[in-house]
Amino acid sequence: MPNSSNPALPPYARASVTGAAFGCLIVASSIALSAHSFLAFFSLAGLVIVVGGVISVAFMSFQTSDVYDALNAIAMMLREPHSTHADLHQDMQNIIRLARLTNARGIRALGSGIDESDIDDPFIRYAVNMALSDYGPEDVRSMMDTASDAAYERDCVPVDVLRAMTSHAPAFGMVGTLVGMVAMLCNLNDNVAGIGSTLAVSFLSTLYGVISARMIYMPAASRLQHEVDNRHFRHHLITEGMVMLVGNETPSHIKDRLNGFLRPDMRDYFDAIAKPPAAVARLVDARAEHAGNSNVRYGSFRRMAGVGK
């Protein structure tokens, strides 16, 4: 299970960097083909109106910590996500390791097992505390589902902040346009030569609002939502594994159950279809002996596997 306390920044994602570079290249190419200078598309007043207005409304609408998390998500947009689907396999292996430990030394060995594995994930430690508090499997499931849903709701708030920024940016671009138009009309009789620069501020504000909404805030919101969904899915896997662990299920049973959460190419299980009958028979014998199944169930299992009568 990944250690959530690792402060190291993840590397940049090649696909995200390539997409951002391609988008910027398209915009820069259109500017180069339509204007004599890139400075013609720079307006400090327009940037202040759009960026400052969006951030100020965000702080007015949401808690400060949620706005900071949203801004941090923008900064992390081009990096690899902290939690990926590939990490689920490692989570499954760690749960199976804990299951073997509890089968050998009892449920009280979970505390030492967590310390030996150097697992500092708050969700994992909460699950272990519930298991060590002598709660039943269904009680553990209920508590972990509550913790998972609460964490999901909290993690979705920065996504709402970014989506609000997406809707506010074009609006403040229109505000900049109106400000520029009013300034142009006020100076229409006094300084005709200044109409061009004033009108440029008007249209550049709208441009900044649309580009920032579609190339910054919206992709950051989608990326953060994807990470939040992956984290919630991971919590679901951990919940299922810990409930089965508290229910004293065998490690092989837990492994087969958790394999269903993984992509088919990442699953780790014995393929009874592709293996020869002799190998299937050995697996059936080992599992039946370990689980203490009845002779009726054992015989049925062998007949279903096609390795004996």
Image (tube, rainbow, N blue to C red):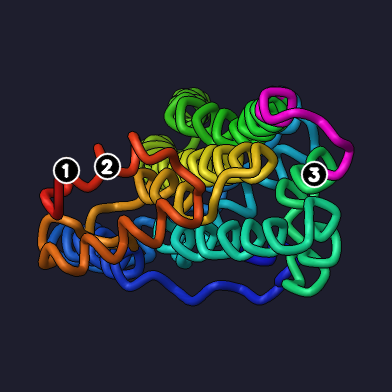
Badge 1 marks a residue whose secondary structure is: helix
- Which of 265 and 214 lies nearest the eye of the viewer? 265
Q: Earlier in the sequence, mark 2 or mark 3?
A: 3
Q: Residue at x 54, y 59 (%)?
A: 91
Q: CA distance from mark 2 to mark 3?
A: 41 Å
Please report the bounds of the magenta region as a residue range.
132-142
Rendering coords of residue 134 (x, y %):
85, 35
Q: Residues within 10 Å of mark 1 (few under 14, many from 20)?
A: few
* Vertical order, 31 against 135 (above or below): below
Disc 1 to disc 3, C-alpha distance = 43 Å
Judging by the rendered image, the residue that carries numbered circle 1 is 303
Please name the predominant secondary structure of the magenta segment in the image.
helix
Q: Is residue 135 left or right of residue 235?
A: right
Please report contact status of discs 2 and 1: CB closer than 8 Å, yes or no: yes
Disc 2 to disc 1, how far (Cα)? Answer: 6 Å
Using residue 244 as the reference point, say whether residue 223 is left or right of it.
left
Mark closer to the observer (2, 3): 2
Query: Badge 3, how many Cα within 10 Å: few under 14, some, many 20+?
Result: some
47 vs 62, nearest the viewer? 62
Q: Which label is found at residue 247?
A: none
Disc number lying in front (1 or 3): 1
Residue at mark 2: 299
Residue 126 placed where, x, y %? Answer: 80, 44
Q: Residue at x 74, y 32 (%)?
A: 59
Q: Amino acid at mark 2?
A: Gly
Q: Residue at x 10, y 67 (%)?
A: 276
Q: Which mark is residue 126?
A: 3
